[in-house]
Image: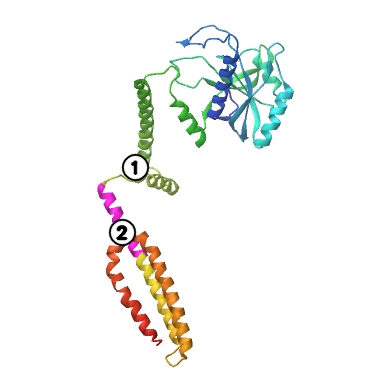
């Protein structure tokens, strides 16, 4: 049994790596002429079968003591010589470097229920690429009683056994790290219809179970947050403004409850806003018209030449028609506000007529 690692490294494993390993094993198994049956583990009793092993590299980043495994790719392995295809590995590494320049080979992966003796040969072969590679082992067996992921991460450490220094595998803990795209993909895969054509009741039960688990987890998180805020309010713990701002931002994301009263109030506020906007537009246009009339009266008084007055009258008429056309273009967008603004609109013709009389061009 492998010991526990004491390196102090923190491992973050992305779901894409698990999906890639599972897909790699499934494809190789389906392409085999006589595929093996899946291993079924009931209560720890393992059935013996011929396991078609697969191998590949895991890539990612390492920042300080944190190792984050993002992706993986396959390797060509010769079981007879227990060696890797080095040119293929170098070619894949070069291609991935062009696409992901910040990713490095962190180690390798395989499948199986436990570490085998031949695994150390592959592990040592990759030490020229990474001096301390990690080993990700996926167990393809089916254990209905197991709740944890069938994935184990191993590191290699030098231990003195019977007076001889040996390199052995030690087990390391890890956390699952996801991004938005991975969460959507995993959720989609989890809701796929079973290949055996499971009943609708079974799918509904699984869906309700997942919803119940999500709500239960949300309830526990909200309870912890509520207790923390109560302790902060009582003065048992110091007040942290940054945390309070995060809680306030979280609460503002909650959806507004749908109700008839809310819809009525919302429409009323919406109509009032449209009315105020439309009246402000009319006021600005009226002010512009007044300024235009004042400028025309200043430039062409009553005693000016008739020809110039006619030209000014024609120019003013064109400008006035343009302004009124602008009014008409905005009318369809404020149908809800016309009823409230109707009184003001009725006075508009008299207002325009007064402006024309004020010019007194004739």
Mark 1 and mark 2 lie on one chain; the one further toward the N terminus is 1
Indicate whether 188 appears above or below 156.
below
The residue pinned by badge 1 equals: 230
Q: Which residues are magenta?
A: 260-277
Please report contact status of discs 1 and 2: CB closer than 8 Å, yes or no: no
Q: Main secondary structure of the magenta part?
A: helix
Q: Quick one: 352 or 307, which is closer to the camera? A: 307
Indicate whether 16 appears above or below 118.
below
In the drawing, what numbered circle is on residue 336? 2
Q: Position of residue 216 (x, y in %)?
A: 36, 30
Q: Quick one: 17 or 68, which is closer to the camera? A: 17
- Name which residue lies at 49% across and 31% down: 185
Locate residue 237 relative to residue 55 in the image: left or right: left
Residue 350: which quarter of the image? bottom left
SS category of the residue bearing label 2: helix
Q: Quick one: 163 or 3, which is closer to the camera? A: 3
Which residue occupies the extreme left position in the image? 261
- Name which residue lies at 35% across and 67% down: 279
């Amino acid at each position: 049994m492998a010991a526990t690692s004491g390196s102090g490294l923190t491992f973050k494993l992305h779901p894409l790596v698990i999906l890639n390993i599972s897909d790699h094993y499934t494809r190789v198994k389906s392409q085999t002429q006589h595929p093996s049956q899946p291993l079924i583990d009931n209560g720890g009793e393992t059935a013996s079968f011929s396991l078609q092993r697969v191998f590949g590299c895991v890539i990612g980043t390492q920042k300080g003591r944190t190792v984050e495994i993002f992706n993986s790719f396959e390797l060509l392995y010769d079981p007879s010589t227990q060696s890797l295809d080095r040119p293929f590995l170098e070619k894949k590494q070069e291609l991935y470097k062009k696409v992901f320049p910040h990713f490095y080979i962190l180690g390798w992966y395989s499948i199986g229920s436990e570490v085998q003796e031949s695994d150390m040969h592959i592990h040592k072969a990759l030490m020229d690429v990474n001096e301390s590679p990690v080993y990700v082992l996926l167990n393809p067996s089916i254990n209905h009683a197991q709740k944890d992921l069938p994935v184990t991460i191993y590191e290699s450490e030098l231990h003195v056994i019977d007076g001889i220094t040996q390199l052995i595998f030690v087990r390391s803990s890890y956390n699952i790290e996801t991004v938005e795209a991975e969460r959507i993909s995993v959720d989609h895969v989890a809701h796929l219809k079973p290949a055996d054509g499971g009943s609708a009741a079974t799918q509904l039960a699984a869906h309700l179970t997942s919803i119940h688990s999500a709500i239960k987890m949300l309830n526990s998180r909200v309870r912890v947050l509520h207790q923390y805020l109560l302790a902060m309010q009582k003065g048992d713990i110091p007040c942290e403004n940054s945390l309070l701002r995060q809680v306030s931002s979280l609460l503002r994301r909650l959806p507004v409850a749908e109700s008839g009263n809310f819809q009525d109030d919302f429409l009323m506020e919406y109509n009032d806003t449209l009315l105020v906007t439309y009246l402000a537009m009319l006021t600005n246009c009226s002010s512009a018209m007044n300024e235009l009339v004042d400028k025309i009266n200043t430039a062409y008084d009553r005693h000016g030449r008739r020809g110039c007055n006619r030209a000014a009258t024609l120019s003013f008429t064109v400008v006035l028609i343009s302004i009124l056309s602008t009014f008409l273009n905005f009318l369809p967008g404020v149908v809800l506000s016309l009823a409230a603004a109707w009184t003001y609109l009725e006075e508009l013709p008299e207002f325009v007529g007064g402006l024309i009389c004020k010019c007194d061009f004739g």
